[in-house]
Image (spheres, grey):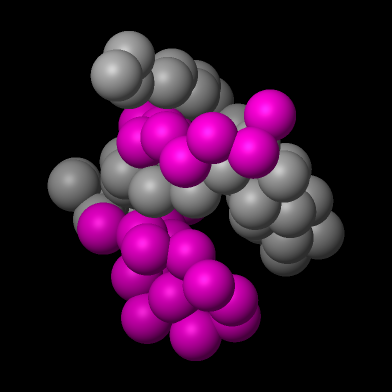
Amino acid sequence: MHDICIYHVEVGGQVLENDINAMGPYEMRAVQANTKATQFTIRTDQSGLIGLLRHLHGRGFVLLSITREHS
């Protein structure tokens, strides 16, 4: 559960990379962003991912998909 992995996340709406990176120890990298959806990768453990998802949910973003890169 504490393994660091790369997650691919897509949410509805536009998320700014600097906003997420400033809020915690995440290493988010935007892959594609427009006004309808944002796709990004994040390198964190499962606990960090859950914290990020809660933060995004609290700001009103809708989760569209999430996958974990196999290592």
Q: Residue at x 47, y 41 (%)?
A: 4
Q: Quadrant of residue 46?
A: top right
Of 11 and 71, nearer the camera is 71
Residue stretch rendered in magenta on the structure: 1-29
Answer with the quarter of the image where residue 8 lies: top left
Which residue occupies the foreground of this view, 5 or 59? 5
Q: Is residue 70 above or below residue 37?
A: above
Q: Residue furthest front?
A: 2
Query: Who's the residue at 72% across and 45% down the image?
Result: 47
| Residue 68 vertical placement versus 56 (above, below) | above
Image quarter hosting the N terminus: top right
Residue farthest left in this picture:
31
Q: In the figure, 24 relative to 8: above or below?
A: below
Q: Is residue 30 left or right of residue 53?
A: left
- Measuring 65% from the left and 52% from the top, which residue is drawn there? 48
In which quadrant of the rendered image does the C terminus lie?
Answer: top left
- Furthest toward the bottom, the residue is 22
